Image: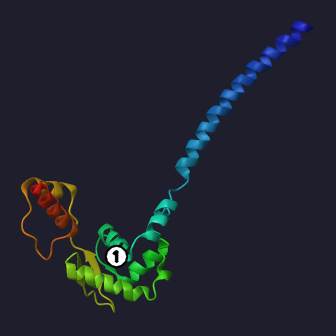
Amino acid sequence: MLLAAETERIELATKRDGLNRQISELDKIIESLRVLLNPLPKEPPAATEVAVKMLKHAGLTDVVRMMLQSTEGYTTVTQIVDTLKAIAYPLGRLENPRAALVVVMSRLVDRGDVERKDIGKIEPAFRWIHKTSIGQLMQQIGTGISEATPQEGLADRLAKQFMEARKKK
């Protein structure tokens, strides 16, 4: 009787081990199918807590400059306001956010960083003019920089200042 009970226990333990392997394999399959069948979010992920804190302390001009540099094509002040609201930029600290943005855009246009275009709507659209790549910047540093023009971008001005500082040493 003892031998029969021990034999039955060994058989059941063997079956259990086989079932545990099957369950483990099914768990892997189920997880893989979940990943494949759950669609990726269509919206980009929300800004991280650190990014949100950084944005809250960044100046309006810096934030607008970053937005324009990362945007393809033209953007209106209304679109900029909507984007700033979406990223939780503290527009409430400004008395008139639209007016402040119009002033910022006007200054960026005057500096030659931004182009203004009438697009047949009530408000004009703007786009960043100079998007200097690292390769272009390295080429400028290596070969020297031509004289500044009113249309040169921020990266061009920084590269020029770097070269002038390097020559002084």
Which residue sits at x=88%, y=13%? 5
Residue 75 x %, y %: 33, 78
Q: State which quadrant residue 101 falls in.
A: bottom left
The N terminus lies in quadrant: top right
Q: Which residue is mark 1?
A: 61
Instruction: Name above or below for residue 169 compared with residue 100.
Output: above
Instruction: Name above or below for residue 108 compared with residue 137.
Output: below
Amino acid type shown at disc 1: Thr
Query: Is there any visible trace of residue 43 in the rendered image?
Result: no
- Between 31 and 161, the residue placed more toward the observer is 161
Instruction: Single out the residue that lies furthest toward the front.
Output: 169
Residue 23 x %, y %: 68, 33
Instruction: Name above or below for residue 103 compared with residue 47.
Output: below
Query: Is there any visible trace of residue 13 in the rendered image?
Result: yes
- Between 31 and 156, the residue placed more toward the observer is 156
Which residue sits at x=23%, y=81%? 109
Residue 163 x %, y %: 13, 58
Report the colour scheme: rainbow
Q: State which quadrant residue 127 falls in.
A: bottom left
Neighbour class for label 1 at 10 Å: few (<14), some, many (≥20)? some
Residue 42 x %, y %: 48, 63
Specify whether 66 is left or right of 52.
left
Which residue sits at x=21%, y=59%? 133
How many numbered dots are placed on residues in this image? 1
Instruction: Name above or below for residue 39 compared with residue 15.
Output: below
Q: State which quadrant residue 69 falls in.
A: bottom left
Which residue sits at x=15%, y=59%? 165
Specify whether 17 is left or right of 29.
right
Instruction: Single out the residue that lies furthest toward the bottom.
Output: 122
SS for dot 1: helix
